[in-house]
Amino acid sequence: QVQLVESGGGLVQPGGSLRLSCTASGVIFSIGNMAWYRQVPGKQRELVASITRDGVTNNAESVKGRFTISRDNANKMVYLQMINLKPEDTAVYYCNAQIYFRIATYSHYWGQGTQVTVSS
C-alpha cells in the first residue's frame, strides 16, 4: 500500500513564507514525476508545480518567481517552498506522485492535503 503524507501547511500573513513537504511510503519500485496541486472550494484542482525524476521543473504562471519545487529521491520526498505568499494562494495543497511498482507499471497517488491560509 502506497501513502503520500503532506505536512507544513498553516496560517501565514501576506508576504510570508511556508515550506510544504510530502513523503511517499510503501512498496515502491521508483517514483517518476511528482507535483503539487491546490484546490479551493467550488473550483477545480489546479497544478501548481511539477518536477521530473531528473529535476526538471514546471511552475504555474501564478506562482513563478515565488514558489520552488524540489525533491529528494533517496528519501522519496518532494517539497514546495513558497515565499511572498498572497491571499489568493489560500487553498488545500495536495501532493501527487507517479509511483512505479515495476518497470513500465505505475499509478498516480494523492496525499490527503494540507491547508494553507494566507490572511492578516
Image: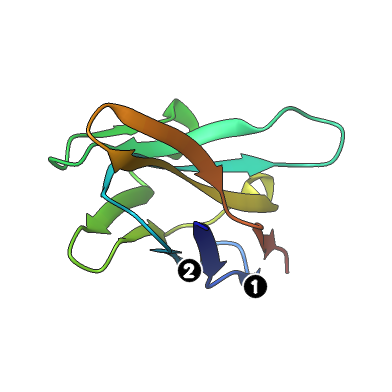
Q: Is residue 16 left or right of residue 58?
A: right
Helix, strand or loop status at disc 1: strand
* Figure quadrant of the C terminus: bottom right
Question: Which residue is nearer to you in this view: 110 or 83?
Answer: 110
The type of residue carrying mark 1 is Gly
**Relative vertical location of residue 22 with respect to residue 65 in this rendering, above or below:** below
Q: Based on the displayed image, in which of its 4 quarters is residue 73 positioned? A: bottom left
Counting other residues with Cα less than 10 Å from the Cα at mark 1, is it few (<14), some (14-19), or many (20 or more)? some
**Relative vertical location of residue 70 with respect to residue 58 in this rendering, above or below:** below
- Counting from the top left corner in percent of width and height, residue 89 is at 62, 48
Counting other residues with Cα less than 10 Å from the Cα at mark 2, is it few (<14), some (14-19), or many (20 or more)? some
Q: Is residue 99 left or right of residue 72?
A: right
Q: Is residue 9 left or right of residue 83?
A: right
Q: Residue at x 25, y 69 (%)?
A: 75
Which residue is labeled 2 in the image?
Answer: 18
Numbered marks: total: 2
Q: Is residue 51 left or right of residue 47?
A: left
Question: Which residue is nearer to you in this view: 8 or 24?
Answer: 24
Tell me the CA gap for discs 1 and 2. Answer: 8 Å
Asked if marks 1 and 2 touch (Cβ < 8 Å), the reply is yes
Q: Residue at x 19, y 41 (%)?
A: 53
- Counting from the top left corner in percent of width and height, residue 64 is at 37, 37
Which residue is labeled 1 in the image?
Answer: 10
- Counting from the top left corner in percent of width and height, residue 118 is at 67, 61
Question: Which residue is nearer to you in this view: 7 or 2?
Answer: 2
The type of residue carrying mark 2 is Leu
Q: Which mark is residue 76?
A: none
Helix, strand or loop status at disc 2: strand
